[in-house]
Image (cartoon, grey):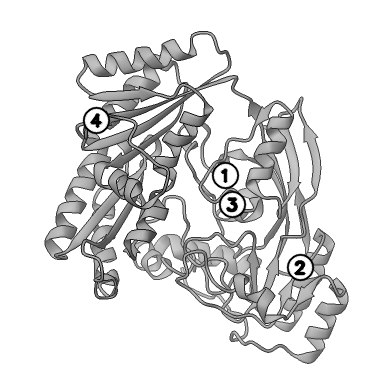
Amino acid sequence: MTDTLSTASPASTTLPAALLAQLKQVLGPKGWSQDEHELAPHVADWRGRYQGSTPILLKPANTEEVAACVRLCHEAGVGITPQGGNTSLCGAATPQGEVLITMKRMTAIREVDVDNDSMTVEAGCVLENLQTLAADNNRLFPLSLGSQGSAMIGGLISTNAGGVHVLRYGMTRELVLGLEAVLPDGTIWSGLTGLRKDNTGYDLKQLLIGAEGTLGIITAATLKLFPRPSRMEVAFCGLASAEDAVKFLGLAKQVSGGAVTAFELMPRMALEMVLEHVPGTRDPLTGEHAWYVVCEMSFGRADGARETLEDALGQGFEAGLVADAAIAENDSQIHDFWRLRETIAEAERAHGKAVKHDVSIPVSKMPAFMAKATAAVEAEFPGALVIAFGHVGDGNVHFNVAARETGADDAFIAQAAPLSRLVYDLVDSFGGSISAEHGIGILKRAELASRKPVDVAVMRAIKTALDPKGIMNPRVLL
C-alpha cells in the first residue's frame, strides 16, 4: 500500500488576507482572536513540552460556524488544529502554525433522555460538568480522569480517553452511541443516535473516535448513561508484590460479582513522593509495604456493600495477597485515598522532570513487564528512578523515569530517546501497546510509524480518502 497522503500548506503564522477576512466575517467579533495574551494558553501543550503558534484562534458557537470555517480552510488548503480543553499529553492539540479552532463556546446540552440512558451534548462541555449533569438525573457518566475539570468531551472522544473506570465501563469509545462531526471539506455529518443496535453498514463514528482530529472535528456526541450507584466502598491496601495485586484483583472481581469499578496500583516510592510533595496527604496504613492498591467497588444497593468489600479483603488476607488494608468510612476518606493515587503526577513534577510512558500490557504480564523494564532501565541508565504505577484492571502502566538525584534533570532528560526506545522495545516483546490512553499526537508519531508500518499505511489510506488535502491536524498521529 503506497503513501499518497497530501499535506496542507506549510505552517505559517500568517494567512492570506482574503481568507482571514472571510473567517472573521463568518464568526463575528466574538468568534475569533489574534490577541497574543488570549492565544498564549492555547499554543502551549499541557505538559509544557511543545510551544506552538497560530495566525488566529477561531471560536465558533455552533456546528454551522465550524463547518463554514473548515470549508474556507479546505478551499485554501490551509491546515487546521482542533482543540478542546487543551489537556492532551502528547501534543495533539498544539498548533504548529495552523488555524486553531477551539470548541470552548460549544457547551449546549441538547438532550438528556433518562429512559434511554443517554445524553446528547456539544463538544465543548467539560467532563466534570457532564458527570454532575448525569448525577442530577440520577444517572452515572463513568468517564473519570485527573484533568476532568478542564478536559472537554470532544477532545476526550478524539483521543479515546481512558481513566480509572475502564475496568468496569470501558474506554471512551465504549461510552459513545453517536457523533456529529464536520468533515475535512466542511460537510456536516450527523450520526447522533441513542441506538444500541444499528447494523446499517460501517460504524462511521468509530473512525473519528481516537483519530485525534485528523479526520474531522467532533461537534456533538450522544453518550451512554448508567444507573447511579447508591453505595461506593473504597479500600487502601498494602501488598508485598505486584503479582499479589493482580491475583487480588481477580479475587475481588469474583467475590463482588463484578462490582469492582477501579483498581489502582502504586509502589511505595510513589507514595513517599506524594507524602513529601503534596500537602495534606498521609499514609492510611501504619506499616510500610512494597506496593499499594486503591480498590473501589460500586453497588446499586447499600445493603451488603461493606460486607462484600470486607469479604474480599478477608479472603485476600487468608490467601496471603493483602498484608494490610484500611476501609474509607466516609466521603472525606474516600477523597483522601484517591488523592494519594491522583496526585502522583503532581508529586513527580515537584521532584523533577521525567521521561513518561503511557503503555498497556496484558494484565497477567504486568508484574513481569514492570520488573524487567525497571531492571533494564536501571542497568542501562545509572541514576534512573523508575516510577511505575497505573490501572491494573485494564493493563495500563504509567512507566515514568526520572533522575534519582535532584539537579540532574537536564542531563537525564537528554537520554529520553534511547530510554524510551528501550522501554517500547520491551513493551513490544510483552505484546503490549506504546499508547494506552494518551494517544499518539506529535510525541509518538515516529514510534508508531516505525513499529506498525502496515497499520499506519491503512490509516493513511483512510486519511487520504476523507482528507485528500491533508488539512486536518496535519502534524499529528500520521
Whichever of labels 3 and 2 marks the residue nearer the N terminus, that label is: 2
Q: Secondary structure at mark 2?
A: loop
* Amino acid type, label 2: Lys
Residue indicated by mark 1 = 173
Residue placed under numbered mark 3 in the picture: 156
The tag earlier along the polypeptide, 2 or 4, is 2
Who is closer to the viewer here, 248 or 136? 136
x, y percent for residue 313: 32, 18
On residue 239, which mark appears?
Answer: 4
Q: Indicate which disc residue 59 carries.
A: 2
Q: Where does residue 261 sit, x and y in percent of width and height?
A: 47, 29
Give the spatial CA distance, label 1 vs label 4.
33 Å
Is disc 4 placed on a helix, strand or loop? strand
Q: Amino acid at mark 3?
A: Leu
Q: Give the Cα separation between the discs numbered 4 and 3.
A: 33 Å
Instruction: Tell me the distance, in whole angstroms, between the alpha carbons under discs 3 and 2.
Output: 19 Å
Q: In the image, what residue type sits under mark 1?
A: Arg
> Could you tell me residue 263's position as x and y percent?
39, 33
Mark 1, mark 4: which one is toward the viewer?
4
Does label 1 or label 4 sit earlier along the sequence?
1
> Residue 427, percent across and down?
28, 53
Q: Is residue 109 left or right of residue 11?
A: right
Kindly indicate the quadrant of the structure image that contains residue 463. bottom right
